Image (cartoon, rainbow, N blue to C red):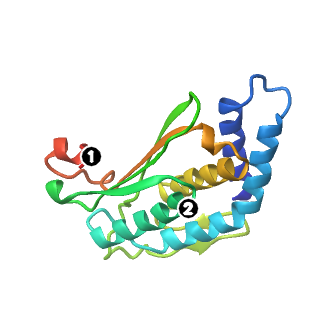
Amino acid sequence: MNQIIRNYLWIVCLCIFSPAFSQLSPEENKIIKATDLRTSAAIELLKKVVNTNSGTMNFEGVRKVGGYFMDELSKLGFETRWSPGDHFNRAGHLIAVHHGTKGAKFLLIGHLDTVFEKDSPFQNLEMLNDSILHGPGVSDMKGGDVIIILAMQALHDAGLLKDLSIEIVMTGDEELNGEPIEYSKKIW
């Protein structure tokens, strides 16, 4: 798991900070060090969100998973809010915004819900070995959401987040869209 996270963040570093792929910049080294320091906590966060059922129609579970991510993003200086899903019969969406001081702007999108509703027999995380986790949402999408959080934490710890304008949207109805769809895709 640690190697997967490092590989993902390496790609992010190359895309954002490195003009050439030949050597690591000081910023990239800071990001990698910060990632290494936070990886254990990221795995614990992943375990917590995977063990929280957030099937699309489990509104309480979707909101709870969103709350975990809101807490982490708030600690980094993001303005976070919950866009309620009452108008389209779903839990809602997490919106987090960071206003940077320099040019680059990024939109990161994930989702909080899974296809595994409360009555699904597939509910809990299982560690298959030292680097493979198996559980509802591990790869779609809770693992990706945790990587977004870890990337933001690493950028913060490296002193680079302050420059970036980032909006993160994590929807609560990716697996089963709310109706009417025009309300489901609107931020309230």
Q: Is residue 19 visible?
A: yes
User: Image point 75% across, 54% down: which residue?
Assistant: 34
Give the position of the N terminus as an image quadrant. Answer: bottom right
The image shows residue 160, relative to residue 77, as above or below, that is: above
Q: How crowded is mark 2: few (under 14 residues within 10 Å), some or many (20 or more)?
A: few
Front residue of 161/142: it is 161
- Residue 41, percent across and down? 66, 68
**Which residue is labeled 1 in the image?**
187
At numbered mark 2, what does the secondary structure look like: helix, strand or loop? helix
Task: Count all numbered tags in the image, as a single digit.
Answer: 2
Any mark on residue 52, and which?
none
**In the rendered structure, which amino acid carries the disc numbered 2?**
Lys
User: Image point 53% across, 52% down: which residue?
Assistant: 144
Front residue of 117/26: it is 26
Q: Residue furthest right?
A: 23
Q: Residue furthest front?
A: 101
The image shows residue 56, relative to residue 185, as above or below, that is: below
Q: Can residue 58 be seen in this view?
A: no
User: Image point 30% across, 62% down: which residue?
Assistant: 56
The image shows residue 168, relative to residue 120, as above or below, that is: above
User: Image point 39% across, 70% down: which residue?
Assistant: 64
Could you say which quadrant of the image residue 85 lies in? bottom left
Could you say which quadrant of the image residue 132 lies in? bottom right
- Residue 55, percent across and down? 34, 66
- Residue 149, percent across and down? 57, 55
Q: Residues within 10 Å of mark 1 (few under 14, many from 20)?
A: some
Mark 1 vs mark 2, CA separation in Å: 23 Å
Is tag 1's residue or tag 2's residue first in the polypeptide sequence?
2
At numbered mark 1, what does the secondary structure look like: helix, strand or loop? loop
**In the rendered structure, which amino acid carries the disc numbered 1?**
Ile
**Which residue is labeled 2 in the image?**
75
